[in-house]
Amino acid sequence: MSGELLFVALFCVVPVIIFGLIAYGLIQRMYHFQEVLADGVETEAVVIRKYKRSPRFDFRRRIVFEYRDASGTVHRKDEAVFSSEYDRLQAGDTIKVLYSAKRPYVYAFKEAVEQSRAAMTREKE
């Protein structure tokens, strides 16, 4: 009996929980992006450092950057980036970000917001 429960837990329940957590993260990120799209405040962020998450896997590139909101609070973020961005950016470089006026810790890269706005404009035409 306990073997059957373990089987059910490992192969049925655990994957459902993992899928639910991934879906929750994606939905939350989508809402955050929409919030920045609606009332984003532009600022410059400074790249603090860049690193690879694992020396074995070349695709796990990350940058750490920080920006200040209108009240002067510093927000430090750690974000996965494409290899082209990773190779282009160096510590000390600036990148443009937009943060939510309501919740300054919610941000998006300005380039992504501009691409989204351009796509929405093309859809309306």
Image: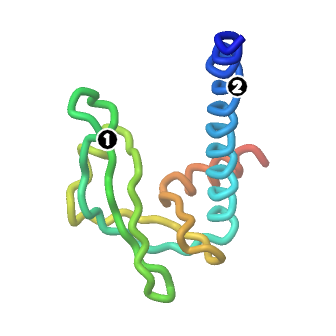
Q: Position of residue 103 (x, y in %)?
A: 61, 73
Q: Earlier in the sequence, mark 2 or mark 1?
A: 2
Q: Which quadrant of the figure contains the N terminus? A: top right
Q: Which residue is mark 1?
A: 61
48 left or right, relative to 81: left
Front disc: 2 or 1 = 2
* Mark 2, other Cα within 10 Å: few <14 / some 14–19 / many ≥20: few
Q: Position of residue 104 (x, y in %)?
A: 56, 74
Pick whichever, 117 or 26, lies toward us.
26
Amino acid identity at mark 2: Val
Q: Position of residue 36 (x, y in %)?
A: 62, 64
**In the figure, residue 46 lies in which quadrant?**
bottom left
SS label for mark 2: helix
Q: Residue at x 57, y 65 (%)?
A: 106
**In the figure, residue 95 lies in which quadrant?**
bottom left
Q: Residue at x 24, y 47 (%)?
A: 51
Q: Residue at x 69, y 55 (%)?
A: 31
Question: How far apart are the alpha carbons under marks 2 and 1?
Answer: 32 Å
Pick whichever, 99 or 96, lies toward us.
99
Residue 43 vertical placement versus 60 (above, below): below
Q: Which residue is mark 2?
A: 13
Taking the view exactly as shown, the residue that stands out farthest to the right is: 124
